[in-house]
Image (spheres, helix red, strand yellow):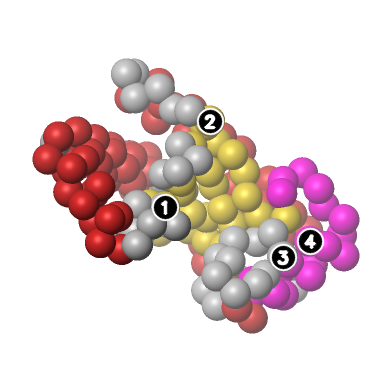
């Protein structure tokens, strides 16, 4: 890994081009619009009031139906910057919730989605790839893909925790 000063010089050079700022701004505007779409389309769900912008590693917001909220669970719609994809994650309010539901999923042998073992720095229990290499030319179609995949994931999770949860 390059020393910090050299990294900053490379960063400065890229910033001078202006493309990164413009692309990042466009991405944040799209994700804010996506959050608003979920808020307006699913008024019975709690949708986080803001987005987590991250450190150019991930950006996300939460969508929480009442049946998950009472279990201290949420669905995060995540854009992974380096992987360049959207995912939906089942997450919990804290590490105890993450561990409890991870154990439930493991014991049930549920393999419909990728189960993630709770460890330091891990915020998900389940992960589902929504869109690989998203096409930002057609934002309406992209939003529809994300919505369809997210609602399928959400319904599967709600059904599972309703049948297996405490």
As rendered, which of 79 and 158 lies closer to the eye?
79
Q: Judging from the image, what secondary structure is the residue with disc 2 in? A: strand
Q: Using the rendered view, name the quadrant where residue 81 is placed.
A: top left
Residue 92: x, y in percent? 57, 69
Residue 104, above or below 55: below
Say if mark 4 contacts mark 3, CB within 8 Å.
no
- Mark before the other along the chain sequence, 2 or 1: 1
Which region is colored magenta?
Answer: 97-114
Q: Residues within 10 Å of mark 2 (few under 14, many from 20)?
A: few
Q: Which residue is mark 3?
A: 117
Which numbered disc, 4 or 1, marks the residue closer to the eye?
Answer: 1
Quarter placement of the C terminus: bottom right
Q: Judging from the image, what secondary structure is the residue with disc 1 in? A: strand
Q: Which residue is mark 2?
A: 132
**Quick check: can you spot residue 111?**
yes
Is 129 within the magenta? no
Q: Is residue 114 left or right of residue 57?
A: right
* Mark number, residue 58: 1
């Amino acid at each position: 890994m390059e020393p910090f000063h050299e990294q900053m010089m490379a960063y400065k050079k890229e910033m001078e081009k202006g493309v990164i700022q413009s692309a990042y701004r466009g991405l944040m505007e799209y994700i804010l619009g996506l959050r608003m779409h979920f808020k307006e389309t699913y008024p019975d769900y709690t949708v986080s009031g803001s987005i987590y912008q991250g450190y150019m590693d991930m950006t996300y917001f939460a969508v929480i139906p009442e049946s998950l909220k009472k279990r201290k669970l949420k669905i995060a719609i995540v854009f992974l910057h380096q992987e360049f994809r959207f995912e939906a994650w089942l997450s919990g309010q804290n590490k105890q919730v993450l561990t409890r539901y991870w154990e439930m999923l493991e014991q049930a042998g549920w393999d419909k989605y990728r189960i993630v073992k709770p460890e330091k720095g891990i915020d998900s229990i389940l992960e589902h790839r929504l869109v690989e290499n998203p096409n930002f030319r057609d934002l309406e179609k992209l939003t529809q893909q994300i919505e369809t995949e997210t609602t399928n994931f959400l319904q599967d999770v709600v059904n599972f925790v309703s049948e297996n949860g405490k």
